[in-house]
Amino acid sequence: MFIRWTYPDVPPAKTLGLNDLVISWNGDAASFLESSRKQGYHVYLEVTPQQASAAAEAGKNIAAGVLLRVSPSEQIDVDATLQTLRSLYPKLTFLVLHLGKQPQMRGTLVLNKNGVLEVSSPTAQPWLDTNLALVKIEQALHPRQVPLYSFEWELTDSLQKVQGPHVEDYLLAVAEAAAFHADLVLSLHDNLQKALAQNDADGMHLWKQMQDYLEFYSRSKEPVEPAGNVGVLAGDYKKSYEPINLLARHNIPFRILRPTDLAADRLKEFDMLVVLASPPQNIKSITDFVARGGTAILVDLPGPYPWQSSRRVQIGDHWVAYAVGKGRVIELSEPVPDPETFAQDLRRLIDKQKVLISLWNALTTVAVPYRKPHDGVTMLELINYAEDPLRVQVRVKGSFHSIRYATPERGCCESLTPIQHDGFTEFVVPALRIGGRVHLKERHAGERTVPANAK
């Protein structure tokens, strides 16, 4: 966690319990940088790519690093800039800072249909703004850097503009980044910065709640990696982002693939493959994946392809499905017009026996499964964007004899009752306020199973 600071004074680092401070680079940054260092901080300079060289030269002996704030369109160009800067200033840490969105629940959904923005009814399913798609894409494209993002607060009413975000909004931002295994540069409202600098009681009370969340999510845990049996070959960021975002929103566990990942051994880990980018020259890997029983969905990528000589099993207005071996290829003839419908259709296409996780009573909840390397799901991160306690029913593929539930508010751990049914384990999370973590342990031979009809 990095804190973006703009107020003239800063409290000692031990007061916040954090050491990483971010300030914007400008002509006055040098003096503030030095005073912040004396307060115990590692100070990072936030810059545009055009400012990076000047900021690095000025801060090479006193700054901890430089954060390059980039847009998706600048991502390709910034890689070369980073390589040059790292060679010139080896003592500085250089990181890419992406622009994310404020995590929140909205009452309406905005869709872009043929260039026209359409707003859904306020009574429709709530729309969640999450950063999971951004994080997933960055984890795949730049595996050596933990994804780092920031966002601007959307303060809509006059009172919030003066007082700043609610404490729950701050807590949600912290929980989301931690649950997605990303780093966050968190902006504090001017009012809160002033309160902390002056040791104001109300400001310190709010920050104490923040510290509880920071402590909970910073505790060491076993190394895990994202779990998901849907592979997504992402292409152009603008074209791919919204479909990927809706997969995340609908709790479809997926992993982003690069063209080099489309090897036979890697594809064995997946049951479905969604191709949003131009497929590799060797189409055989996709054909073999489908022949073994997988489902491949190609979006707006006209052929010719070898499977087009196979039997057509279904035809729609803008799509056609071909039977290939034990599986099928579905070709969409146009870009995804409605990402919401696309995500719902994908969930229906997945064999029910192969769905990794399902949630009920959870329209405002995003679940992210993790696993130990070469293992099944062992941990589930839950984020409730409504910020009001929910009772969530969860089903996870596998047989688990131990379900332990931890939250920042209640610590670790509460044992939940597992119910085994048809190759899945079901359990109920009693109270998910904002963030929660579920630890799952697989059943060993000889251990007693709770019957499916247990009360």
Image: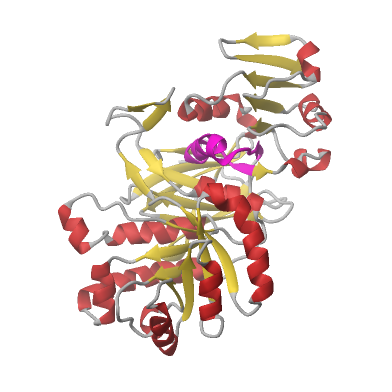
- Figure quadrant of the C terminus: top left
Can residue 441 be found in the magenta stretch?
Answer: no
Camera-nearest residue between 179 and 13 = 13
Residue 45 as seen in the image, left or right of residue 288: left
For the question of whether residue 326 can be seen, the reply is yes
Residue 42 as seen in the image, left or right of residue 190: right
Decide: is 6 above or below 454.
Answer: below
Residue at the extreme left: 159
Image position, residue 398 (x, y; %): 64, 43
Image position, residue 239 (x, y; %): 55, 34
Camera-nearest residue between 81 and 121 = 81
For the question of whether residue 405 can be seen, the reply is no
Give the residue displayed 30% in from the left and 50% down from the top: 388
Give the residue displayed 43% in from the left and 71% down from the top: 25
Quadrant of the rendered image containing residue 187: bottom left
Decide: is 172 above or below 22.
Answer: above
Can residue 230 be found in the magenta stretch?
Answer: yes
Quadrant of the rendered image containing residue 232: top right
Image position, residue 140 (x, y; %): 65, 50
Give the magenta range: 229-255
Give the residue displayed 40% in from the left and 44% down from the top: 129
Residue 309 as seen in the image, left or right of residue 395: right
Give the residue displayed 44% in from the left and 64% down from the top: 185
Image position, residue 351 (x, y; %): 63, 27
